[in-house]
Image (spheres, grey):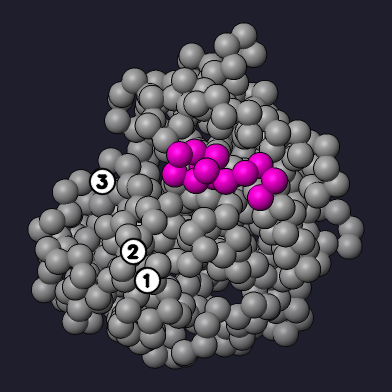
Amino acid sequence: MNKTNPSAAEGKNVMPASPGADDAVTSIHKWVVSWAASIQGPYPIGNPAAQPDMSRVFPRPEAGARDQSFRLIVRPTLWGRETRIRLSNVLGTTPITFDGVYIGLQHSGAEVTAGTNREITFGGKSGVSIAAGQSVWSDAVALPFVRDASVSDLAGRKLAVSFHIVGESGPMTWHAKALQSSYVTWPGAGAKGHEEAEGAFSFATAAWYFLDALDMRAEADTYAVVAFGDSITDGTASTLNGDDRWPDVLDRRLRALYGNRVAVVNAGIGGNQVLRPAVYPPPQSLPVFPGGPSALSRLERDVLTLSGVHVVIWLEGINDFSRNGTATYEAVAKGMRDGVARIRSRIPGVRVIGATVASALGSTSAAHGFLEQDQKRRRLNSFICTSDVFDGVVDFDKAVTDPRTGEMRAEFVPDNTLGEQGDKLHPNRLGYLAMGAAIDLELLARRPQ
């Protein structure tokens, strides 16, 4: 199978029309990414949140899943009458065979709304084998329950994407911190994706596995905004199943203004850095970095090959300046400049928005909260605001940081995921609401090319 098609980054219509579709209709539609999850791993390496004990589900992480079915719950930020998914084995070490792949409208929990489950094929076949290091797009599949994509009656609803692993998967590519409940069967349970009932999906998980993107067929003027960042974009300390990360807040604001014309997808990874690690995964003699591949090394997969991208909001740097990073301000600024240049060279007309980094002063996290980190953060924010690198700036620092103390505003500290005191590094639901509200929507409006 071929790797992800780079032309998807421009939103080109790279899939054939459904049988019988009118050519004129096809020509004014394109693929636009509607949901994404930046991959990391292999499982269980990462920074999960509220993850149940999965030792009975995956007894041997190196063996991964064994003859099991997954039902992953995802929330599209754009609806269309056709969709396709991308399955990934990028961080695996052996080929994986998927079959029994289905998509339907989630009813509740692991149950699919009756009559909505549809089989997904790959090159017309019901299964696909994906080599280690590769990912594959599915064929287009019709969603007949989407009666009129221009009507927002499905806004906020979620899809259930189900698939079966034939044999053993080996090390699993995953996104550790979904902050969304999904479901898995017992090992050896076989293919269960066709079942709309929830009974076979015995276990809950707060992570996503193998699935890293979902597109919708959309009108020609539709586009996507990618929120690219670390744990503060990933949503650490927000509400489990609450959809209250700052990109979720932004999505709701844009939908209220533009309807079903703009998608917002989350490309955050907890612990991510702009510069490190240089190689991911590392040689076997070294431990795997829990923050995933560096921002610069994952640009290709998490931004440039997503469909219909027109705006990128980049919020990173605090982890580079932590005790786990120790990067200089100059190196991070150069990395951002180089990354923006790569984005512009690949996506014509793209707008790249820089986001200022909020304070971590006084953080209870062992890696954060010291003065030198804050001094570097302030210098990076000055670069973001005053350089010619970005097309605009979102001032998250002003929205989250208390000017009297230089620390996070007190009301934003208590953790909503686990009900704990918080760490003065990650905002809670209230903090993410403030961040989402601080974005000038005019910065994200489509500009003529």
In the depicted view, which residue is nearer to us: 114 or 262?
A: 262
Label 1 sits on a secondary structure element that is loop
- Residue carrying label 3: 51
Give the Cα separation between the discs numbered 2 and 3. Answer: 25 Å
Position in image of residue 89 (x %, y %): 39, 75
Q: Residue furthest top?
A: 404
Quarter location, residue 45:
bottom left
Label drawn at residue 283: 1
Label 3 sits on a secondary structure element that is loop
- Residue carrying label 2: 286
Vertical side of 127 occupied by 161: above or below:
above
Q: Please tell me which of labels 3 and 1 falls first in the chain.
A: 3
In the depicted view, which residue is nearer to us: 77 or 386?
A: 386
- Start-end of magenta stretch: 319-331
Residue 90 left/right relative to 309: left
Q: Amino acid under label 1? A: Pro
Specify the quadrant that holds the C terminus: bottom right
**Is the C-beta separation of discs 1 and 2 under 8 Å?**
yes
